[in-house]
Amino acid sequence: MILGVDFDNTIACYDGLFHALALERGLIPADLPTDKTAVRDFLRDAGKEDDWTELQGLGYGPDITRARPFDGVTDTMRWLRDRGVETHVVSHKTKTPYRGEPHDLHAAARRFLDHHGLSPTVVPAERVHLELTKDAKLQRIAALGCTHFIDDLPEFLGEPAFPDGVTRWLFDPANRYRDETRFDRFASWSQIAEALRGTLTT
């Protein structure tokens, strides 16, 4: 097995962070749900798309260590490491935000992995691949020879150019894609860990 894992919203959970950042700036009411989508939709509906874009620059940039890994992801990746499974982080991420200060988003993502004990001790730094475009992400998955890939976006997993022969798993902790039938769907990393154990023992 060679496992590829997306970064944003698959390893890194931003729900509480974006809510906190928006609340600190007086952009949202305190009783708004804490998930990132609720914050985004509220700001867009209020005509504050630019504020949302700037929040993303902060959340994916200098404030990224205030986000947290999804429950179970660190333990699962340690378990994979201990069994010699080659695991790669493969993400599509711009180098700097579209708006606001030119924070280095690639350096920030690596800082998150280091801060939360995921790299380099669990996933070596050379196995963290931050690609500038979606096409480059697809090409990286192919070049690595991934046998399995985990992502939170069904539209990415369903790309016509997605490499053939890769088992595609959809991470859907908020149950947004309950009608998706093209891919095995997982609500938690504990479910993913169970599936991985089954795959590695068969």
Image (cartoon, grey):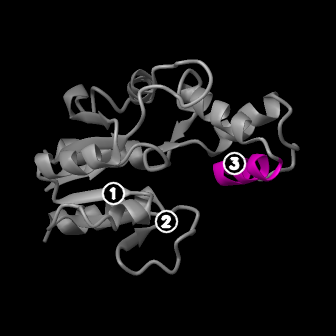
- What residue type is disc 1 on? Ile
Q: Is residue 166 above or below residue 145?
A: below
Query: Could you say which is closer to the camera, residue 136 or residue 23?
Result: 136
For disc 3, the neighbor class at 10 Å (few under 14, some 14 to 19, many from 20) is: many
Q: Is residue 162 left or right of residue 97?
A: left
Q: Which residue is mark 2?
A: 187
Residue 40 badge:
3
Query: Could you say which is closer to the camera, residue 2 or residue 107?
Result: 107
For the C terminus, give its image quadrant. bottom left
Residue drawn at (58%, 63%) of the image? 174
Q: Which residue is mark 1?
A: 150
Q: Judging from the image, what secondary structure is the residue with disc 3 in?
A: helix
Could you tell me residue 130's position as x and y percent?
Answer: 32, 34
Q: CA distance from mark 2 to mark 3?
A: 22 Å
Q: Specify the segment rendered in magenta.
A: 34-46
Q: CA distance from mark 3 to mark 1?
A: 24 Å
Q: CA distance from mark 1 to mark 2?
A: 12 Å
Query: Could you say which is closer to the camera, residue 78 or residue 51?
Result: 51
